Each structure stands twice: as structure tokens, then as C-alpha cells.
Image: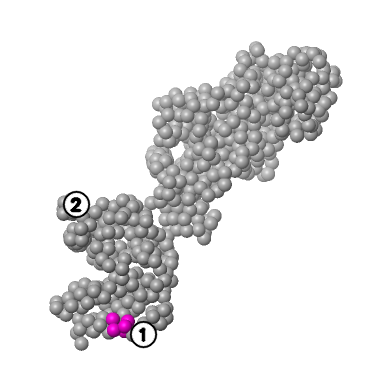
Amino acid sequence: MKPRHAFALAAGLFLAALARDGADIWIDATALPPLTPETSVQVLDRHDQLLRAYTVADGRWRLSLTPQETDPEYLAMLLAFEDRRFDTHHGIDPRALLRASAQALWNGEIVSGGSTLTMQVARLLEEGTTGKVTGKLRQMRVALAIERRLTKSEILSLYLQLAPYGGNVEGLRAAAITWFGKEPARLTPAQSALLIALPQSPERRRPDRFPEAAQKARDRVLSRAVSAGVLSQAEADAATREPIPAARRPFPALAPHMADRALAADAGKSVHHLCIDASLQIATETLAADTVRALGDRVQAAIMVADYQSGEILASVGSAAFQADRRQGFVDMTRAFRSPGSTLKPMVYALAFDEGLAHPETLIDDTPTRFGTYAPQNFDHQFHGTIRLREALQLSLNIPVVKLLDALGPARLLKSLDESNVYYRLPQGEAGLAIGLGGIGVTLEDMVTLYAGLANGGNARPLRWRMDDPLMEGKRVISPVAAWQVTDILTGLAPPPGAPANRLAYKTGTSYGHRDAWAIGYDGRHVIGVWLGRPDGTPVPGAFGADLAAPVLFQAFARLKPTLTPQPPAPPATLLLANAQLPQPLQRFRPRDAAFQAPADSPKLAFPPDGAEVEPLPSGLMVRVEGGLAPFTWLANGTPITTAERSRETVLPLKSKGFLTLSVIDSAGRSARATIRLR
């Protein structure tokens, strides 16, 4: 029997079989393949834009898609070309089968198969063929059973996900991205027509290999769309003039390190929503690639952008290129532990201001100093003599910050890092004074977190990188006054040559041996961190944070937004005075021995004692001092509360719950302190 006769006979027998009383039983007994095919894991940005997708187990691109996410005109053209009665038939279309049989008998060959979209879905689910009668009968039976299990929308979704487009591309969404670099929600008529024609012969009509065949097939779909009234003739004529794509486009691979991190954190999830902004991520990745291009083939760059008001990471570049090269691009350098150089210094200054040890206008001696066996040197091996702390931080001098840290104690700095959600590694597990100069291991992500807390008025909280992660409550690490004072100092730094003088608060850092170059900065809303170096930790001769990383920081802000968000004004309690107007103890920094070894007649806090928990009176906190010479100055967290107080017992207007450092200074400049908790 000839193929055309066999096909016609099979179709007739099949239709006759349906008329039998046992048809329902026969259909219900059909063993169906799985109706939920595996689709690619997707990582989306904050606006649901695709950042990255992962192939399914057999290496195919197959993205989930529903009719509601598809261009309506594409769907209309698809049904007009493939299955006009899709909405009314029950899996097979008897009229289409009879027409196909008649055409086969008349032409001596199969002209059209008569397959419905449901039959095509059945074939795709079972990966069957259409060339044999038994295969066609199986598709019919499965199609009838599918129609009883699924809605028309669900069947159409399966077709949109499984239709072949050549190579390892399956489904309309993967094809639209591959051939046009766009989502299937807004396709042109020409694009829709090509994507309807390709599944019929995906390899022989591939536009990059057989453009003429692809164009002819596309134009036939356009012609059918005109006949069905879906398109006007003018629309179809315009679509035929649209060029055929000449090459496949790569799938999006934005924020690859963070995408892998999301997958590792929740491997069973099919869709991951990150806080990343895709357009900003593209701009930041381009900046990183442009930066390292002139720095040799081993220097790498990492950049992170965060909105510290919302606590969200908006861009994260772990390397300039996600590839196995001499730059070790597969390593996420935003999460690698590196020496921060001088970028921890602002935190030391903030703590010193907070503890009442110093003020930005306090004078300090930058002279050769030894702390036991430790004798720090400035980066340029020069000494500046007596200098204001404001200038010492702006010049990033080492000796002044070590003096401050010696008075505070290294444990105080580590405590502030713990409270700021910063993880760190100590060399040999010891915390010495060198940690203030970078003798500690931290990550770029954690340094951005630290500066976000500083920028946010001293209120630190973990940064959020996934949209469904809860927004964590902040914790007060330093006072708003101390945070503003440090910010005011950092905004006074001159920008790099050629960069705009835009009052960006920033700090640079260079680790020992020129292994790491840092720049971290913030305005009134965003914080950006930049790291440059070699992932293997070998030196980069001549690399300085101010020369390499700072220009990248300013460029990153320029790509983030056209103008900076202004910094907030000084808190009301800020002491805005010149050095000569400061209380005598704040005019010149006193070393640790002077601060903690008071003479016998020095003032002492009789109440409240150090470490006490006190419930204030309705009018405030009652305090009492013994010893010392009146008048007295009382300070809370370094902020003067009352001055020229002659009584040894007074009530301070302090009622807020929490920890505070209470200080009293007598007329001779001698002081006493206590850390208490108000409840």
C-alpha cells in the first residue's frame, strides 16, 4: 500500500474508532508522558528582566512561558497558520485530517499533516516522529487524552516551551532571545512569522545557515496571516522587507557570580529574583572590563553598588570577565578576603569621636612613635608634626590613627565590625594595632556594608541581594554626630584628576606590598566599592588606591546617575567649633596613659557607676560627680549636654533607652567616663 493510501486509511479507521462506545475508556486509559517538562532555571533582576539562565539537564535552552506573556499578534498568527480551530476541537481536527488525506491522495504525497497544536505537543512531549502511521495514531490518542487533562492555555504553554528552533534552542522565549535578543512579549510581525515557521523544519530553515529558506518560510506565514485577516496586506509587505537575522545572539549572562550564588543558596528554586538592576549591571560590568584592559592580563577588578537607604545591592561585578583566564575571572572578588589598607581608618576616627576622645579639629602629633615593639610609619615615611585630625584622615596618615586605636583598644574596632555585620579574618588570630592599617582580611561586599552603615548615620544593617529576603533591622554602631563628622571630612578630599568636584565622601586604600587598591565612596543615597588587584595575591607594582581605584569609583557614580544625592545636614548636637573654641580636653589628643591614669583628685563619677543599668527620672538622668574642680562639663556619647555646671549633682535631659558613654570634665580638663545603659 502506498504511503498516501495508508495515511488516508489510518485516518478513516481512527475516526471510526472514535464512534465506538469504548472511545472514552480508550482515551482515559492512555499512558501520558510527564506534562511538566523541565525548564531552565532563571535569574531575574529587580524588574523581572532576565540576568542569566541555565540550560536543562540535556544542555538545551528551554524557558518557561505562558500565553499571557506572549505577543497577542504572534498567537493569532500561530493559530491562523497551524491550527485555526484550536479553541473548539478536542485534540484532533477531523476537517483538517480529511483535508490532509484528500490532498495526499490527490497529489501523491503528503502536502499537510493535519496535525493540531495539541498533536504537536503530544509529539514533542514524547519526542516522537510524524513519518509513520503508528506514530501519527499515537499522537492522536495522546492529544485526545491531553485535552481532557489540561486547559487550552496550558496546552498552548507547552507548545510555547517545547517547539524546536534548531540546535539546543527550544521554545518561543529561548528562540526570541537567541534570534532577536528580546522577550516574546513585543515581537514584530516579521519576527513572529519567522518564529512560527522555524519549528516546522528547525535545522533546514536556520537563519544563520539557510537565510533564503528561512525568508521563504517566513513570507508564507505572513501570506497566511493576511488570508486569515490577522495582518493587512500593507503590514505583511512591510514585514517581508525586514532582514532575516544573520547570527545567533548569546544568552544573557549578567551578574554571573551572584547568579551562581543564588543557585547554590537554593538549588531547588526555578526562578530567582535579585535586587540587581540589569541596566546598571551592564554599565558596571562594561566599566570593569574597560578598566582592566590597560592593566595587563593578570589584574582584576571588582565593583559593588548598593542603595544604603533600601539596603539593596544594585550591581555586583565579581570580575571583569567570567572566564578561566589569567585574571581568574571565575573567582568572585567581591567575596574574597583581602587586606583593606587604609579603608578602615574612617571607622577608627568615628569611634574616637563617639567616645569623646577627639573631635575633627583636635590637634594630634604626627611624630615618630613606638607602641611596645610596634613602630608604625606613614606611607611616605614622612612626619607632619602637629596636625588636625581632619587633615590626618584626609592625608591618610598612619601614626595618628594608630594613636587613636591604641586609646580605643583593637577590641573596640572589632566589636564595631561585628555590630556592622562585617566578617573578618585576623592574621594568626591576633588583633593588634596593625588592624587599623589593613592588617586584617575583609571582603569588598563587607566593606561596602560597613560604609553603608557609616553613610546611613551610623545605623548598620546587612545588605540585601535577593528580592525575597527580608529587610533586616538596623543597629546603631556609631552616633549620627560621629558619622556626620567623618562624612564631612571625607567629602573634603580632592577628587582624582579629571573627575568632577562633586562632594563625594570617599576613601582610598592600598594594602601592604601593593596587592590591593581600594576606593569606597558614598553620597546621600548610594555607596560604591571598587577593588583592583590580582586574585592570587601577588603584588601589582606601582598600584595605589588613589591612582587606580579612585577614578573608577567616580566613573561608577557617573554611570549610576547624572548628579549626586546631597549629604544630609549636620545633626543638631554636632559641635561645630574651631580648635580654640573646643573644651580643653578636646583641643589636643592625649595618649592612652593620660586618658586612663587620672590623678587622685581628678573627678570621679559617683553616680551612675560604670556598667550600671539605670532607669531615668521623668525629668532625665540624675548624675553626681566627686572630686575635681567646678565648673563641670557633662557629655553623652561625646556630645556636650551641659557646660559651666557648678553643682556636683544635676539632672541631664537623657531619656532614650540604650547604651551611652557618659563623660564629665572639670575646669582643669580632667575627666571621668562610664558606659551605662538606660532602660
Sequence-wise, the earlier of marks 1 and 2 is: 1
Residue with the most extreme top position: 580
Q: Which mark is residue 568?
A: none
Q: Residue at x 51, y 47 (%)?
A: 467
**Residue 276 percent coordinates (x, y):** 46, 45
Q: Residue at x 54, y 40 (%)?
A: 311
Most common secondary structure along the magenta stretch = helix
- The magenta stretch is 15-19
Indicate the amino acid at tag 1.
Answer: Asp
Q: In the picture shown, does residue 532 fall above or below 149?
A: above
For marks 1 and 2, give the one nearer the viewer. 1
**Residue 595 percent coordinates (x, y):** 75, 23
**Residue 385 percent coordinates (x, y):** 62, 18
Q: Is residue 246 left or right of residue 466?
A: left
Q: In the picture shown, does residue 101 fall above or below 585?
A: below
Give the labeled residue for mark 2.
235
State the residue in front, 551 or 279: 279
Visible in this render: residue 673?
no
Q: Is residue 563 left or right of residue 345?
A: left
Quarter assignment of residue 145? bottom left
Q: Indicate the quadrant containing the C terminus: top left, top right, bottom left or bottom right.
A: top right
The crowding category of the residue bearing disc 1, from other C-alpha atoms within 10 Å (few below 14, some 14 to 19, many at least 20), is few
Quarter assignment of residue 406? top right
Q: Residue at x 24, y 74 (%)?
A: 95
The crowding category of the residue bearing disc 2, from other C-alpha atoms within 10 Å (few below 14, some 14 to 19, many at least 20), is some
Indicate the amino acid at tag 2.
Answer: Glu
Give the labeled residue for mark 1.
21
Q: Indicate the quadrant containing the N terminus: top left, top right, bottom left or bottom right.
A: bottom left
State the residue in front, 477 or 173: 173
